[in-house]
Image (cartoon, rainbow, N blue to C red):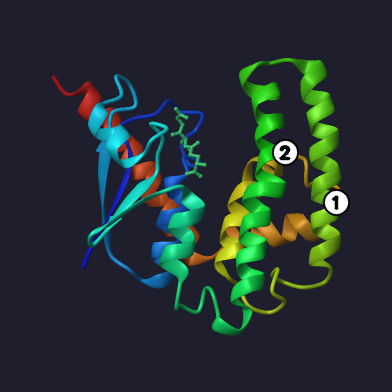
Amino acid sequence: MSLILTTYDWVPDAPRGFVRDIRVRWLLEELGRSYRVETVPSRGKTAAHLDSQPFHQVPFVRDGDLTLFESGAILLHLAEGTGLMPDAQRPQVQQWLIAALNSVEPFSMAWIVARFFDKDQAAAARRELLLRQRLGQLQAALGDHDWLMGGTFTVADLLMADILRIPAQNGLLDDLHGLAAYVERATDRPAFRKALADQMAHWRAADDRKAAP
Ligand SMILES: N[C@@H](CCC(=O)N[C@@H](CS)C(=O)NCC(=O)O)C(=O)O
């Protein structure tokens, strides 16, 4: 059965390519699962939206009778029983996926908010130091391996790499060659490229709808 992925009906330029439905699109492409996209209004948020996502955020999915929000929970659900979460490594994959969400993304988000939203240079510098420390630790943990599980790309890599995209694009991995190569390796995968192209096409179609008389 086709899965329904819900994202916003429109967003401004800056978050395009980074709205978190990209993670779900990416995994669905990796798995070769078909899906269709529905939208909720980004402005004038609705009660119906709140029924599926209690924080009025995206993404959320409907998979048969199941409605799920939180990108991490969606990824865990979809990866279950697939090669992206091999049975023998399931606890460690879950560990790394939660580390991405809980030990890396909050540091990245705190820096993003200080730098790009609050435009508070002093706070951004402090947040950047803390984020750089976390990124260095992550690179050390990755060591010489291609992926967090060693030789196998898993859903934990998908999420970790997605979280690292904004720091990478803003130069924070320039001195962390191993981690930079890791992000490049992940985002060079055809499934990521397709997911990104599809998300960008979604926003272009949204612009066209807005411009239509
Ligand atoms: N922890 C949530 C975060 C979701 C989230 O922050 N979504 C953003 C789009 S990428 C959003 O909906 N922002 C609007 C808002 O927070 O009101 C998840 O991973 O699904």
- Where, by quadrant of the figure, is residue 182 drawn? bottom right
Can you give x and y, in whole percent of width and height, for residue 149 in the image? 69, 74
Mark number displayed over residue 136: 1
Query: Is residue 94 found left or right of 193 in the rendered image?
Result: right
Q: Secondary structure beneath disc 1?
A: helix
Question: For the view shown, which residue lies furthest in the left direction?
Answer: 213
Left or right, residue 35 beside residue 138: left
Between residue 164 and residue 67, name the one nearer to us: 67
Vertical placement of 155 versus 72: above or below?
below
Q: Residue at x 60, y 65 (%)?
A: 94
Label 1 Cα neighbours within 10 Å, binned few <14 / some 14-19 / many ≥20 = some
Q: Is residue 193 visible?
A: no
In the depicted structure, whether residue 170 falls above or below residue 71: above
Quarter of the image where the C terminus is located: top left
Q: Amino acid at mark 1?
A: Gly
Q: Position of residue 53 (x, y in %)?
A: 36, 39
The residue drawn where x is 25% and y is 28% is 47
- Residue 57 image offset from top left, x and y in percent: 41, 35
Query: What is the tally of numbered marks visible in this picture?
Result: 2
Left/right of residue 2 with respect to residue 119 in the rendered view = left
Return the disc, 2 or 1, that comes first in the chain's sequence: 2
- Which residue corresponds to mark 2? 107
Amino acid type shown at disc 2? Phe
Q: Quadrant of residue 38?
A: top left
